[in-house]
Amino acid sequence: MENQGTMGGLLKEARLGMKYTLRYVEGVTGISNGYISHVESDKVKHPSAYTLYVLCELYGVDMMGLIKSTLKN
């Protein structure tokens, strides 16, 4: 995976680990699947805190841990 270790890559990994589709996440969060896709592919490098919070809560990911792990890259 080309963006492995990036914030987007880690979020995508978490989503796929939960077996959630982009459409499912859109339906649950109200965040468009296109935007989520852009976050996951790192086209959006700095998603809002709200977006990160909602996705991390849904995926069971520690938001601060995610941020800290991606600051090292």
Image (cartoon, helix red, strand yellow):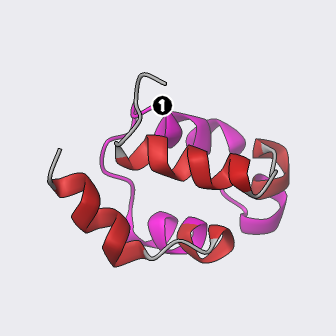
Residue 29: quadrant of the picture: bottom right
| Secondary structure mostly taken by the magenta-highlighted segment of the chain | helix
Is residue 26 positioned above or below 12 on the image? below
Task: Locate the C terminus by quadrant.
Answer: top left
Badge 1 density bin: few <14, some 14–19, many ≥20, Cα 10 Å: some
Q: Position of residue 5 (x, y in %)?
A: 35, 42
Task: Give the SS element for disc 1.
Answer: loop
Is residue 73 positioned above or below 50 on the image? above
Q: How many numbered tags mark residues here?
A: 1
Is residue 21 positioned above or below 63 on the image? above
In this picture, residue 73 sits left or right of residue 18: left
Residue nearer the viewer, 61 or 36: 61
Q: Position of residue 44 (x, y in %)?
A: 38, 39
Asked if the stretch drawn in magenta spans residue 2, the answer is no
Residue 6: quadrant of the picture: top left
User: Which residue, given by chain and number where applicable, does mark 1 sit on?
Assistant: 41
Q: Residue at x 66, y 56 (%)?
A: 31
Asked if the stretch drawn in magenta spans residue 39, the answer is yes
Is residue 24 positioned above or below 35 on the image? below
Q: Residue at x 38, y 62 (%)?
A: 48
In this picture, residue 21 sits left or right of residue 56: right
Q: Residue at x 40, y 30 (%)?
A: 3
Which residue sits furthest top? 2
The boundaries of the magenta stretch are 26-55
Q: Residue at x 47, y 49 (%)?
A: 10
User: Callout 1, which amino acid?
Assistant: Ser
Q: Position of residue 17 (x, y in %)?
A: 71, 53
In this picture, residue 56 sits left or right of residue 8: right
Q: Position of residue 72 (x, y in %)?
A: 14, 52
